[in-house]
Image (spheres, helix red, strand yellow):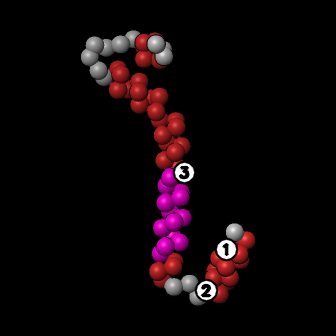
Amino acid sequence: MASGAAEKGKALADGSESAAESAARWAREWSTWAMKNAKVVAHYGFIPFVILVGMNSEPKPRLAQLLSPI
């Protein structure tokens, strides 16, 4: 793990990173950023999504029925 960090620092300092390595690093960083943000969106958006879908269904339930676990 430590050697990987040293190599990463060396590659950035030397500026000898190829275009393919740069693209791979960019894709890895972007996918990590996207997954972290998707986790936050899913975490905070799940309950409002359930309420929205429930309120647009037939028959129309009361809000208490949507929020109760039973």
**Residue found 30% across the figure and 22% down from its top:** 56
Callouts 2 and 1 close, C-beta under 8 Å: no
Dot 2 or dot 3: first in sequence order is: 2
> What crowding class fits label 3: few (fewer than 14 Cα within 10 Å), some (14-19), or many (20 or more)?
few
- 25 w.r.t. 15: above or below: above
Q: Is residue 60 magenta?
A: no
Residue 58: image quadrant is top left
Screen quadrant of the N terminus? bottom right
Q: CA distance from mark 2 to mark 1?
A: 16 Å
Viewed as shown, does residue 52 lie left or right of 58? right
Amino acid type at mark 1: Gly
Callouts 1 and 3 close, C-beta under 8 Å: no
Viewed as shown, does residue 25 lie left or right of 9? left
Q: Which mark is residue 15?
A: 2
Q: Is residue 29 magenta?
A: yes
| Residue 50 coordinates in the image, percent (x, y) | 41, 27
Amino acid type at mark 3: Lys
Q: Which residues are magenta?
A: 23-36
Dot 1 or dot 3: first in sequence order is: 1
Q: Which mark is residue 36?
A: 3
Q: CA distance from mark 1 to mark 3?
A: 23 Å
